[in-house]
Image (spheres, grey):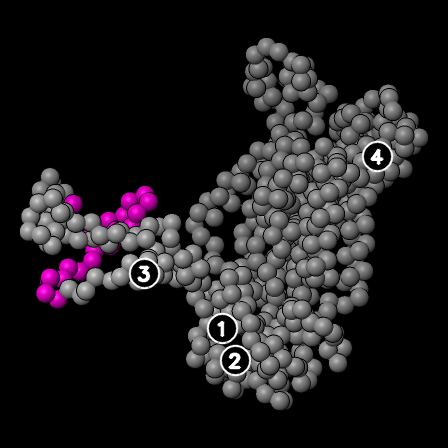
Amino acid sequence: MAAAAAALASSPMVHLTASRLRLPRPSRSPAAATPSPSPASAASERTRSGSFSSSSSSSSGTPGISNEPPFLSFSVDNIDTVKLLELLGPEKVDSADVKAIKEKLFGYTTFWLTREEPFGDLGEGVLFIGNLRGKREEIFAKLQQQLRELTGDKYNLFMVEEPNSEGEDPRGGPRVSFGLLRREVSEPGPTTLWQYVISLLLFLLTVFSCVELGIASKISSLPPEIVTYFTDPNATGPPPDMQLLLPFVESALPVAYGVLAIQLFHEVGHFLAAFPKKVKLSIPFFIPNFTLGTFGAITQFKSILPDKKTMFDISMAGPLAGAALSFSMFSVGLLLSSNPAGASDLVEVPSKLFQGSLLLGLVSRATLGYRAMHAATVAIHPLVIAGWCGLTTTAFNMLPVGCLDGGRALQGAFGKDALFGFGLTTYSLLGLGVLGGPLSLPWGLYVLICQRTPEKPCLNDVSDVGTWRRAALIVSVFLVVLTLIPLWDELAEDLGVGLVTSF
């Protein structure tokens, strides 16, 4: 083993250290050596190629011949990062294919090409800019078919708005350009084994957080030492025995089942909308939260979207399904709460909880009445808690920011520029606590870490989604705002939603 290590150490292989990259330089005999370069040319060579130095032994042995294999030492600090990105980045389109596409796809009957620009995140594609010679949808479909006949499944063709366009197309609408990217670059990768494992672990944590929410809903009957330990910031002493909570697990299951059912129904809505469009979705990555049970789930597109209508419909299907089930649970729970015959199934919760939402607080006040709501605690059915949490989570996911459901829907309906403006407004309102109350900060951090980037463009990223889709989104965002704005003290006192001791 020692002999092998010594042989490896003395071999003229590439040596890599933390700051120097040493490459073997072929040795030449003195007779074949070229004259030494002038200082000016040597400096020029260093400027072009980086800082080089030759390691040789001049203290012993034959002059001019090294006793050690000669090495070429190169400083990593002088590597051309642009060239490195070109080597390690995504594969670019083939110039021969670009030439064939320009000759056989574009022309005076389809798209008159005037110039080309880089396309893609790292400029790995080509953007063809010119003048459209017909209806954009018909021309785009024709070009896609001709591209498949010419190159097979090698590339994806995108129809996007022309960057820095000075005016609209004479036929109406924005001027368009066509982007070309390799299929493996433009399409999402498959779900990996580790992602399945992470998804399973997150789901198990979400089940635990939903059960914890159900236990917390029994706050009026929990052991006092546990309630004090978790609610009083000045509590001292050792933590209480958590086994005291085991008898409450069974009674917490209805709330846990309700919250989980809403989130699963939300995801089913996405998948049912994606199936007829032949769009593949990833497995959902549920996000546990001990206040609402869950913050929802991250579901990625695993195939490229054909157009903005598809993006809008799939994005809206999940929240609509989740909101429908949540509101059903919430409404039925309120009706059962006002029925004296079902008093044994009710749980006592602090009335201040109903001040967390302007819309839901008003609906609860209208259903339960002033007498029931203007008290320290309110007796409600567990379905009210499940529906409330489901509606709040759905509202958070419908905020128009990043790649949340609301952000995707807004991007499909109004474009990326509108999403950028609405995103800044949403972050500001979350930072100020105007939306979401005490949950605004954790939700804002979650979005910034996991969901801040917009969705990638569709193949047809130009065609309009229509008026009724935009109107539906505007109404949805309005309801989201009403759901996430808390009731301020003066209004809560006037309406009798909870007891307000100070203003």
Q: Residue at x 62, y 35 (%)?
A: 289
Q: Position of residue 450 (x, y in %)?
A: 58, 46
What residue does disc 2 label? Answer: 147
The alpha-carbon separation of the residues under discs 1 and 4 comes to: 53 Å
Asked if the residue under mark 2 is in contact with the one under mark 3, i.e. CB atoms within 8 Å, the reply is no
Q: Earlier in the sequence, mark 3 or mark 1?
A: 3
What residue does disc 1 label? Answer: 155
Is 359 above or below relative to 420? Answer: above
The answer to whether residue 394 is visible is no
> With 412 as the anchor, is 93 left or right in this view?
left
Q: Which residues are magenta?
A: 8-32
The alpha-carbon separation of the residues under discs 3 and 2 comes to: 52 Å
Q: Earlier in the sequence, mark 1 or mark 4?
A: 1
Q: Quadrant of the C terminus?
A: top right
Identify the secondary structure beneath mark 4.
loop
> Mark 1 against mark 4, which lies toward the viewer?
1
Asked if the residue under mark 4 is in contact with the one under mark 1, i.e. CB atoms within 8 Å, the reply is no
Q: Earlier in the sequence, mark 3 or mark 2?
A: 3
What residue does disc 3 label? Answer: 40
Labelled disc at residue 487: 4
> Mark 3 against mark 4, which lies toward the viewer?
3
Q: Residue at x 56, y 75 (%)?
A: 116
- Give the number of marks: 4
Instruction: Give the residue type at disc 4.
Output: Leu
Asked if the residue under mark 4 is in contact with the one under mark 3, i.e. CB atoms within 8 Å, the reply is no
